[in-house]
Image (tube, rainbow, N blue to C red):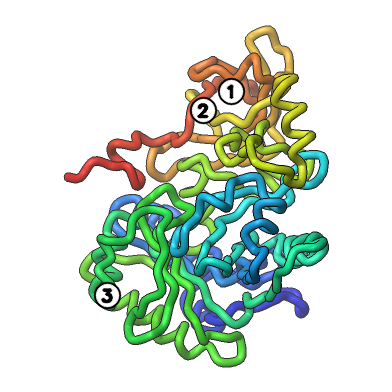
Amino acid sequence: MPENMRRIQLNDLHKQNAKMTVFAGFEMPLFYKGVIIEHLAVRNSVGIFDISHMGRVIVEGVDSERFLNYLITNDVSKLSPNNAQYAVMCNENGGIIDDFVLYRLEKEKFMVIPNAANREKDYNWIVKNPKNFNVKIKEISDEVAMFAVQGPNAEKTLQKISAEELNRIERFKCVPSRLADVDVFLSRTGYTGEDGFEIFVWGASLEKPDNAVKLWKAILEAGKPFGIEQCGLEARDTLRLEAGMCLYGNDIDENTTPLEAALGFVVKLQKDDFIGKEALQKQKNEGIKHKRVGVQIIEQGIPRRGHEIYNDKKEKIGYVTSGTFSPLLKYGVGMAYVQASQALERNVVNVKIREKMVKGKIMAFPFYDPESFGYKRKAT
């Protein structure tokens, strides 16, 4: 491992059981028992992820709502305290600087959760743009650990150690609480497509991670009856791909707009001025030229980043940005950008895999049946 890599609060604990890797400059668990075991545990029961490599930035002050409304494309004024929303932050050209979840902790206090690779970039962008807004901005990432407990048995697992009636917390709601006598901030969100919670562990710094260690072990103990698994980055990636969620740097970046990325639902052009509005309005008026879609491989093969996509006339129409073998569905799935005119569900395409044309079809997200898997699944 590189000597200058960054570490998270539970680094020593993970190294006892996990295969480690470097991601976004952080030493992180790649897997524990294996990607298939961990992936299926989340889809069928419950798994726990350490996501402390992600950022935590507090924005507060009398102008915090107006400032964030200028900074992001979504409408912050719609958020009441203890609510969250998915948002993107764009540059002047409408390119995505980052996508993240924004939390409203109090009337004049918010928390932004940058992706791990963008922690410094996002913080610098936020600090750069206050103009005449009366706000205070504080980076707290190294003072707060962050876990995700995901899967259909996530609520049952955490309820065993919770001071809160968790069934009262709806999706994209959040609340200060206690788990295993540790102060936390709970949100019903996640990056797997499943029901679950993201947990912010207060008082768990890099120098003194005791609260994080205590809570991680308590969650594993509470989840034993449900077969809980510790999960690494590999399972996080395959799960988010099945659910159709973007990975920054692969599927979205500063050369991609939210309209092209099929994230138009978080672009509120009716708002007053925000960074990138003019460019996004122009693009909407003119129409996008290419669009993010799902691609299901219907022959043998696994799509990977950079693989080219062709139509039946052997014309190149797009390229894969993320791809994997789905542990749940048992076939290759990918995320791609194709010409807008070709982005029709079930449109048959050819993916060039190792110099061989392999048939696939354009699919809507998620790849799985949402009545059988994911947070919308029907109760059994």
Indicate the position of residue 124 as horizontal and vertical percent values.
79, 65
Indicate the position of residue 339 as horizontal and vertical percent values.
69, 20
Disc 1/disc 2 C-alpha distance (Å): 7 Å
Indicate the position of residue 274 as horizontal and vertical percent values.
73, 46
Type of residue at label 3?
Ala
- Say left or right for 20 vs 43: right
Q: Quadrant of the C terminus?
A: top left
Mark identifier at residue 358: 1
Q: Quadrant of the N terminus?
A: bottom right
Mark earlier in primary sequence (3, 1): 3
Identify residue for label 3. 222
Q: Nearer the viewer, mark 1 or mark 2?
A: 2
Q: Nearer the viewer, mark 3 or mark 1?
A: 3
Q: Is residue 19 above or below residue 363?
A: below
Tell whether label 1 touches label 3 (CB within 8 Å). Answer: no
Whether residue 230 is visible here, answered yes or no, is yes
Identify residue for label 2. 297
Type of residue at label 1?
Val
Mark earlier in primary sequence (1, 2): 2
Disc 3/disc 2 C-alpha distance (Å): 39 Å
> Circle 1: is it few (<14), some (14-19), or many (20+) Cα within 10 Å?
many
Q: Is residue 226 above or below residue 275?
A: below
Q: Which quadrant would residue 288 be assigned to in this image?
A: top right
Tell whether label 2 touches label 1 (CB within 8 Å). Answer: yes
Could you say whether the residue bearing mark 2 is in a helix, strand or loop? strand
Q: Residue at x 38, y 57 (%)?
A: 37
Could you say whether the residue bearing mark 3 is in a helix, strand or loop? helix
